[in-house]
Image: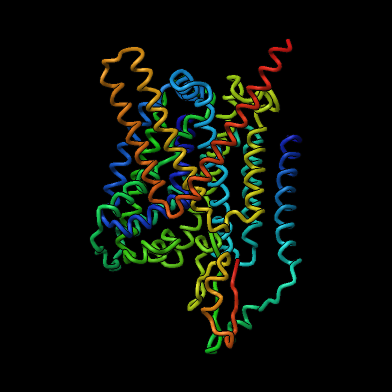
Amino acid sequence: MVRKTFWAVICMGVCLVAGGLDAMADGAKETPRMTKETLKGMMETTDLVILDIRTGKDWDASEFKIKGAVRVDPGKFDEWKDRFSREKTLVLYCA
Amino acid sequence: MDRLVSLAAGLGFILSAETLVLLGNGSGRGGIGFPALILAASALHLWVASTVFSHPAGPEHELGLLKQALGGAAAVILPLASRAAVAVMMATGLLATAGFVFNEVFVYWFPNFLFAFLLLGLILFVNLAGKGLWRVFQLLVVPTALAGLAVLVIAGIFSAQQPADASTSSLGAGAWLQLGFSAVLVLVGYDLAIFSSDTLSGKIVRSPAGAVLLGGLVLILWGGVSQQWVPPGDLAETTIPYTVAARAILGQGGRVIMGIVILAGTGGAVNAAFGGVARMIAGMSNAGLLPVFLGKKRFKGRIPVLLLTAATAILLFSGMAGSSHFDAYLRGGLILWLIHYAALLYGKFIMGLRTDPLCPAGVIHGVGGLMLGGVATGLWLTAEKTGVTAVFMVVVVGAVLILILLWNGLNRTRNSGQ
């Protein structure tokens, strides 16, 4: 019983550390962000373009897709960068 | 009880989210034709299960067959490259999906990747704690997934509401061929049933065939009901056909039930994969085909499970699930798995030639092997990213080959030094 508890604690600890490191890695980058409330308030404006840059399971497994969002491949920036007017506000949406 | 556990292990992949996506998209494109293709694929897999995986159970028979017919290298490369690669890739994708489902259906503020890691940790614990807990877990999650699908199927069939227009556009021969290949893929993984129990080793088991029968039936029913409730175009194009169909049938309640199915199905698939592949690796080690530390003599065979979990954790942490090539990698692994089935049939053909060259059963095995090899080739040629898929297969097989060469070299050095 003690051994099982020991392994359980080790396993959960590894997972929490890994998950925490993942979360911290995202938070450590300095990228301008927008809250969903701010975005929601801007949805009716005509100069807004939401770019959904999710790939793989981030896109496939998610039930929620923003209506009107344009899906683009983040790895092919050169292919789509000129499709959108520089006058518009581009919001990149990812997981 | 052993046979029930074995059946539950065989159903692991079949009830997973990845299979339900293939099923939904295929049902949307092919209409009533897709369940018919699954029926045909079930017949093919049933024959393979009865021929190769039923007697006797355990990794020993499979290893012995491949070793005798195709040599020691093939006995390790094919099962290891296919099953280990798919176990890790499938676990990565399914755990990521489970994280999204938990976040979007049940607890919106809970980070989806944290849930994925916690579920991985739980499955690791279950696999390390001993066979008893592994069996209980598998017998808990697989029937839960089955029950959820059963509720949705029954609701879909007997609901008083008017379902969607189920008409489909006609498809060309090429599209039907692709659907046929998808139908073969949805049942891959039933052979994990043979690794579920040491007490079944050497005995005749029908669990792989049982998994094909029950899994095929469930998929045909769910595919048929999905077609009735979701417009074919939507079903074919959505990335979450299982949720779309469940929501159409029972609204928010259906969404919650399908959420439970996905979470339970993920647990069943990853637990079956890790437990089965770990036992397979331990069996190879005990047969002298892989290093001793991977076998049962050290740490009661827990090293392979730790390695599989570590590999999955690294892939999850590195964002592999979000890679645009992920589906191509998984497809490559599944193609290798089909090639493994083909090799086993070819092995039976070779053994048949050696014992009785005129025996028709041997020829049938050879034809079956060629057929599955053809399906595997067709899956590769019709892949969206043939190059990426091919590179993945080459890298995985190459890595296993290097491992074997190193191990054999080390063995020779030890033996010459004695």
- Check the image and report above or below for B244 versus B218: below
B101, B327: nearer the viewer: B327
Between A59 and B100, the one nearer to me in the picture: A59
In percent of the image, x 43 and y 37: which residue is there? Answer: B190
Image location of residue B173, percent across then percent down: 25, 52
Image height of B118 relative to B11, above or below = below
Image location (x, y in percent) of residue B73: 53, 25
Residue B343, position in %: x, y?
42, 29
**At 39% across and 54% down in the image, what residue appears?**
B151
The C terminus of chain B is located in which quarter?
Answer: top right
Q: Residue at x 71, y 47 (%)?
A: A12
Quadrant in the picture for residue A95: bottom right
Q: Is residue A79 above or below residue A9?
A: below
| Left or right: residue B50 compared with residue B135 | left
Q: Position of residue B203 (x, y in %)?
A: 45, 20
Residue at (62% x, 37% y) in the render: B127
Q: Quadrant of residue B52?
A: top left
The scheme the figure's colours follow is: rainbow
Looking at the picture, does residue B33 appear above or below residue B252? above
Relative placement, left or right, of A61 versus B42 is right
Horizontal side of residue B330 vs B345, given as left or right: right
> Could you say which is closer to the camera, residue B251 or residue A52?
A52
Marks counted in the figure total 0
Residue that protrudes farthest toward the top in the picture:
B418
